[in-house]
Amino acid sequence: MLAALLAGGAAGAFAQAASPAAGRAKAAMCATCHGPLGLATAPDAPNLAGQPEIYLAAQLRAYRSGARRHEVMGVIAKGLSDEDIANLAAWYASIKLEAREP
C-alpha cells in the first residue's frame, strides 16, 4: 500500500515538472525513426504518439540503465537526463490520436 502511495505521488510530481514544449524540441533527434509527430517512419520503430507518459518515461529510463536493450536506443538514452525523459514523455503523451474501426 505504501509503495502504491509513493508511486502515485512520484507520478504526480513527474507530471507537474514535465514540459511538452521542451520535449518537442528534444524530440527532433527522435524523428528519424519515430517520425516528427511520434508516428514511426522506420519499420522496426514503435509509434510513440499518444502513449501514456508514465510508460514512455519508464521505457526511456530502462534503455538508459540497460535494463531494456536496443543497440540504438541504448546509446541515445544514455545521454538523456531525468528532465529530458520527463519532457519527451510529456510531449509524446500530449499528441492526440484518433482510432477508427476498419
Image (cartoon, helix red, strand yellow):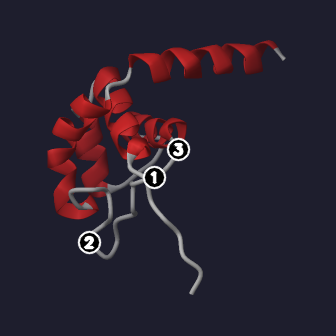
Q: Is residue 72 left or right of residue 68?
A: left
The tag on residue 52 is 3
Q: Residue 16 or 33: which is nearer the viewer? A: 16
Badge 1 marks a residue whose secondary structure is: loop
Q: Amino acid at mark 3?
A: Pro
At horizontal 52% and vertical 44% (from top left) the residue drawn is: 52
The quarter of the picture where residue 38 lies is bottom left
* Label 2, label 3: how far apart the Cα atoms are: 21 Å
Within 10 angstroms of label 3, few (less than 14), some, or many (20 or more) residues? some
Q: Where residue 36 sits in the image (x, y, percent)?
A: 21, 57
Q: Is residue 40 above or below residue 62?
A: below
Q: Where residue 70 sits in the image (x, y, percent)?
A: 35, 55
Q: Amino acid at mark 2?
A: Ala
Q: Where residue 44 sits in the image (x, y, percent)?
A: 34, 72
- Residue tagged by mark 2? 42
* Label 2, label 1: how far apart the Cα atoms are: 18 Å
The tag on residue 50 is 1
- In this rendering, which labeled residue sits more in front, label 2 or label 3? 3
At horizontal 32% and vertical 26% (from top left) the residue drawn is: 19
